[in-house]
Image: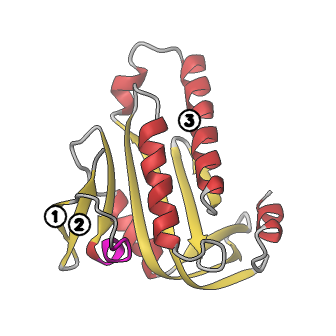
Amino acid sequence: MLKYLLKKKRIPVEKYSGEGTVLISFVTQLDQAISNRSPEELVEMLKAHLATQASIIERNSGIVLLYEGDSVLAFWPKELAQPDTCRCAFESAQAMLQKVHKAFGFQVVLGTGRLAGDYFGPKRQYQVVGPAMNIADKLSKFRYPAHRVVLLTEATKMQLSNSGLSFQVIGKLGGEDILAYTN
C-alpha cells in the first residue's frame, strides 16, 4: 500500500531526504473510554477512528506510515505538501480533533524539519528519521491535561505564521517552548 501511495504522490519509492513535517496521534485517557465497553466494541471504535485519521491525512497530502494500537504516524514530505508541509499537517491535526470519538481523549504532536526516509528494520517498513521525528517523538511523551490537544514547538508554530490561532506555552523542550493548541 505504501509503495502505491508513494508512486501515486510522485516521490521516490526507496529514499527520501529533505524538509518535512511528522505527525504522531494517539488516544489518551483510554481506560476511561473502554471501562464500559466490550473488547469487540473497542475494536470497532478504533477501526473507525484510524480510518478517519487516515482519510484526513491523505486528504491533506500526507502519508500514513504506521498504525500501532490507537496511534498513527504520518509525514508530509515537502514535495507533496505544497506549499507548506507544516500547514497541511496542522490542518490534519485540527480536523482530527474535531472528528475523534467523543469517548476518547486525544493528543496530536507535530515536528517540522529535516527528515530522511527509507525501508529498513527487521520488517523492512518505510521509516523516517531526523530532527523532525525526534521532536515529534519527544513531544509524544509530554502529557497535557486537556481532553483534546495539538502539541508543537515554537519552530513549528513559526511556520504557521499568519494563522491567527491561539497557542499556550506549557513547557520547554531543549530550551524551546512547547505550545498547546486546543479547540
Label 1 crowding class (10 Å Cα cut-off): few <14, some 14-19, many 20+? some
Mark 2 vs mark 3, CA separation in Å: 26 Å
Q: Quadrant of the N terminus?
A: bottom right
The answer to whether residue 129 is magenta is no
Count of marks, rendered view: 3
Residue at the image position 37 percent from the left and 71 percent from the top: 160
**Cβ–Cβ under 8 Å for marks 2 and 1:** yes
Q: Which is more N-terminal, label 1 or label 2?
A: 1
Q: Which is more N-terminal, label 1 or label 3?
A: 3
Q: Is residue 81 above or below residue 64?
A: below
Q: Position of residue 164 (x, y in %)?
A: 29, 62
Question: For the residue marked with disc 2, what is the amino acid?
Answer: Ile
The residue that disc 3 covers is 49
The answer to whether residue 156 is magenta is yes
Q: Which is more N-terminal, label 3 or label 2?
A: 3
The residue that disc 2 covers is 178
Q: Position of residue 92 (x, y in %)?
A: 50, 54
Mark 2 vs mark 1, CA separation in Å: 5 Å
Q: In the rendered structure, which segment of residues is drawn in magenta?
A: 155-161
SS for dot 1: strand
The residue that disc 1 covers is 171
Q: Quadrant of residue 97?
A: top left
Q: Nearer the viewer, residue 98 or 65?
A: 98
Residue at the image position 72 percent from the left and 82 percent from the top: 15
Q: How is the image coloured?
A: secondary structure
Q: In the image, 165: left or right of 118?
A: left
Q: Is residue 24 above or below residue 106?
A: below
Label 3 crowding class (10 Å Cα cut-off): few <14, some 14-19, many 20+? some
